[in-house]
Image (cartoon, rainbow, N blue to C red):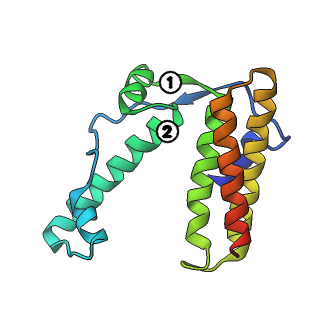
Amino acid sequence: MAETAHQLTSDGFIAKELILEASFPATEGPLEVKELKHVEEGGWIEPDQQESAALDSLRKGIDDALADAVAGDRSKARTALASGSTKLSGVDVALFLGKELAEGAAIFDRKHSRDSMKLKTLCTEGDETIKAAQGLLKDNPDKDKEKEIKKLQDRYKTILKNL
């Protein structure tokens, strides 16, 4: 994800529009994976249910990521990707990448694997991506997206402060 963000914003800018060439999966994932919820609460998944839970989790993740990438929900993603490709706003892509990089950075924080170099790399790439989105918003201001950018910037500062 960081490599993609870097390639899309390597010169400090992101294109106004990008094309996502992908189709929505024929088999949709569930909105919630009950078995994983059970594990989060301290429960156990029987071995014969683990493969199904893993597959459902993967499908749910793909569906949710596509929905986030098109700045909408699953229904919007399904409609947008019905033809196999769709145009995306550069700001929306930058926000999507920024959110995903912040989520990914959490894997490398003190509570988890404690890899400060990887954490800093993800935060740096995420911050650069957010700056590219800000550049596009100068031409077409959008208060809601500016608020999202501010939240992400604050999140990156918090992540780096807690190193």
In the displayed structure, would residue 133 be above or below residue 106?
above
In the displayed structure, would residue 92 be above or below residue 112?
above
Identify the secondary structure beneath mark 1: strand
Q: Which of 1 and 159 is in front in this view?
A: 159
In this view of the protein, can residue 4 be seen by the observer?
Answer: no
In the displayed structure, would residue 120 be above or below residue 76?
below
Corner quadrant of residue 122: bottom right
Q: What residue is rendered at 44% in x and 36% in y?
A: 67
Q: What residue is rendered at 70% in x and 76% in y?
A: 163
Left or right of 146 on screen, residue 48: left
Q: How crowded is mark 2: few (under 14 residues within 10 Å), some or many (20 or more)?
A: many
**Residue 148 position within the rendered picture, expressed as x and y whole percent measured from the top left:** 63, 41
In the displayed structure, would residue 123 be above or below residue 116?
above
**Residue 77 position within the rendered picture, expressed as x and y whole percent measured from the top left:** 42, 29
In this view of the protein, can residue 59 be seen by the observer?
Answer: yes
Marking on residue 85: 1
Nearer-N-terminus badge (2/1): 2
Tell me the residue that label 2 is attached to.
68
Q: Distance between the residues labelled 2 and 1?
A: 15 Å
Which one is in front in this view, the residue at disc 2 or the one at disc 1?
2
Q: Which of 128 and 2 is in front in this view?
A: 128
Residue type at numbered disc 2: Asp
